[in-house]
Image (cartoon, helix red, strand yellow):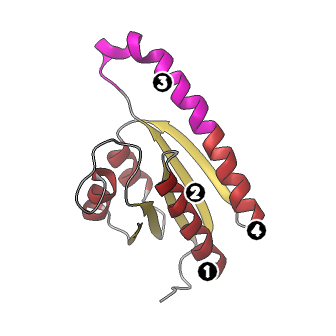
Amino acid sequence: MIRKNIKKILVPLDGSKNSMRGLDEAIYLARQCHATITGLYVIPIYPRNFSDAIMPYQMHLTKSAKKFMESSKTRCAQKGIVFKSKIIFGSPIVEIIDMAKGFDIIVIGSRGQSGLKEIFLGSVANAVVHKSKIPVLVIK
């Protein structure tokens, strides 16, 4: 069932193939509903005592996040979909839930970049499903 009242779609992205599958599904949905997509890339923050050692890694993550978001924007533009990108530092689960206010649906890949594989869903997708106050579409 496609709901015509979907106008703003939030898509958490992390550079993984699964998050790109989530984006592809969001593009399909956006085309059906004439909606816009906001891609949210959350770069994890680390405790202060690690910050000096981890700084070059965070700079690398920021650079690759920007590159991934550019390719996501291009992918949406090719299908005629408006794509806004947002790259922030924080806890992915907290930031996704906070950002979801004002959106109609979250479309998220079932597993992302983390090496831990849970039985059915990745830990971020699982937490978003349980904490979100708006509908969540999980793409496998």
Q: Quadrant of the C terminus?
A: bottom left
Between marks 1 and 3, how big is the CA–CA gap? 36 Å
Earlier-in-chain disc, 4 versus 1: 1
Q: Is 137 above or below relative to 114?
A: below
Q: Is residue 50 magenta?
A: yes
Between marks 4 and 1, how big is the CA–CA gap? 12 Å
Residue at horizontal 60 percent and vertical 62 percent from the top: 37
Q: Is 4 above or below relative to 134?
A: below
**Residue type beneath disc 2:** Thr
- Of residues 44 and 68, the one nearer the viewer is 68
Secondary structure beneath dot 1 equals: helix
- Of residues 16 and 32, the one nearer the viewer is 16
- The quadrant holding residue 137 is bottom left
Frontmost of labels 3 and 2 is: 3
Between marks 1 and 2, how big is the CA–CA gap? 15 Å
**Label 4 packing within 10 angstroms: few (<14), some (14-19), many (20+):** some
Secondary structure beneath dot 2 equals: strand
Earlier-in-chain disc, 1 versus 3: 1
Residue 29 location (% of width, % of height): 57, 76
Q: Tags 1 and 2 in contact by the CB under 8 Å rule?
A: no
Residue range corresponding to the magenta coloring? 46-66
Residue 129 appears in the rendering: yes
Q: Which residue is mark 3?
A: 58
**Residue type beneath disc 1:** Cys
Frontmost of labels 1 and 3 is: 3
Q: Is residue 25 magenta?
A: no
Q: Main secondary structure of the magenta part?
A: helix
Label placed on residue 80:
4
Q: Tags 2 and 4 in contact by the CB under 8 Å rule?
A: no
**Label 1 packing within 10 angstroms: few (<14), some (14-19), many (20+):** some
Earlier-in-chain disc, 2 versus 4: 2
Label placed on residue 33:
1
